[in-house]
């Protein structure tokens, strides 16, 4: 009887020691060969300071495809991603390539050998990090901030998503607004970048927004 009680007690102790794995947000940046994302990109360019005082609106589509594992010696898998562009009246045209990867600390995109840290793990509201800590450029502070999700049109399209504020600097003479929205199991689903110079009711600069149209796992 005493032996049976001892076995049961040890069993309960063992159960208490087993904890569920902590979700650090790893699935907000899914990666595998064949994954494909297609975005609709709407851009507006303002040039009120010129003689013509024009504002041009343009729409195109961007496709990102993970082609293969990169031939790079690294502790984690790295992937080569090809980027294609098209308009409604054209076929897909190759534009550029980049390398992407993630590990237990960060999710990174490297374009033209400039590595930018788009996500920090674990994901937690109000956490800051320097997105440029892997390159030689000046500090660029990103942060998770849930109460800015109202800026996103797709915040209600995915059950679990996280908002990354990259910049929000607005004055009477300029604006620098940048953010990205990531969805669990999908990755980047929406982003916006605004860079404007303002003076005497006029403005010069751009405003563009990406919106995910499709995500496939080939």
Image: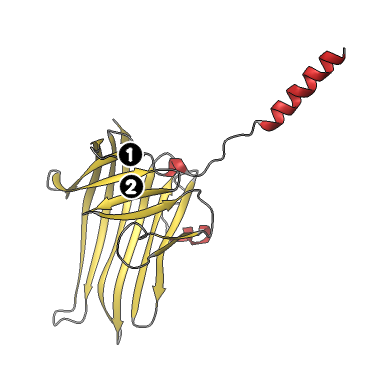
Tell which residue pokes out farthest to the right in this image.
1
Mark 1 surroundings: few (<14), some (14-19) or many (≥20) residues within 10 A = some
Q: How many marks?
A: 2
Horizontally, is 183 left or right of 125 in the view? left
- Residue 61 x/y as whole percent: 22, 49
Mark 2 surroundings: few (<14), some (14-19) or many (≥20) residues within 10 A = many
Decide which of 176, 215 is in the foreground and name it.
Answer: 176
Horizontally, is 92 left or right of 200 in the view? left
Q: Quadrant of the C terminus?
A: top left
The disc placed on residue 215 is 1
- Residue 217 x/y as whole percent: 32, 32
**Point 42% across, 57% down: residue:** 152
Decide which of 66, 121 is in the foreground and name it.
Answer: 121
Q: Are marks 2 and 1 in contact (CB under 8 Å)?
A: yes
Q: Is residue 185 above or below residue 119?
A: above
The disc placed on residue 27 is none
- Residue 142 x/y as whole percent: 42, 61
Dot 1 falls on a residue whose secondary structure is strand
Q: Is residue 218 above or below residue 98?
A: above
Mark 2 → mark 1, Cα distance in angstroms: 8 Å
**Point 74% across, 28% down: residue:** 13
Q: Is residue 86 above or below residue 27?
A: below
Which of the 4 image quadrants contains residue 51? bottom left
Dot 2 falls on a residue whose secondary structure is strand
**Point 31% across, 50% down: residue:** 109
Q: Quadrant of the N terminus?
A: top right
**Point 30% across, 87% down: residue:** 200
Tell which residue pokes out farthest to the top in this image.
1
Q: Which residue is mark 2?
A: 212
């Amino acid at each position: 009887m005493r032996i049976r009680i001892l076995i049961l007690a040890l069993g309960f102790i063992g159960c208490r020691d087993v904890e569920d794995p902590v979700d650090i947000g790893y699935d907000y940046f899914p990666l595998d060969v064949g994954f494909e994302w297609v975005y609709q990109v709407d851009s507006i360019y303002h040039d009120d300071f010129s003689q013509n005082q024009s504002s041009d609106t343009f729409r195109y589509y961007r496709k990102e495809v993970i082609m293969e594992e990169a031939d790079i010696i690294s502790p984690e898998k790295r992937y080569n991603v090809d980027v294609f562009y098209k308009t409604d009246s054209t076929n897909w045209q190759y534009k550029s390539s980049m390398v992407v990867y993630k590990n237990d600390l960060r999710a990174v995109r490297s374009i033209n050998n400039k590595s930018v840290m788009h996500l920090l793990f674990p994901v937690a509201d109000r956490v800051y990090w320097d997105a440029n800590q892997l390159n030689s450029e000046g500090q660029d502070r990103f942060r998770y901030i849930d109460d800015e999700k109202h800026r996103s049109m797709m915040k209600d399209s995915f059950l679990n998503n996280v908002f990354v504020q990259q910049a929000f600097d607005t004055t009477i003479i300029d604006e620098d607004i940048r953010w990205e929205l990531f969805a669990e199991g999908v990755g980047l689903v929406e982003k916006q970048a605004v860079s404007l110079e303002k003076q005497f009711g006029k403005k010069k600069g751009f405003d563009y927004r990406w919106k995910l149209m499709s995500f496939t796992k080939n």
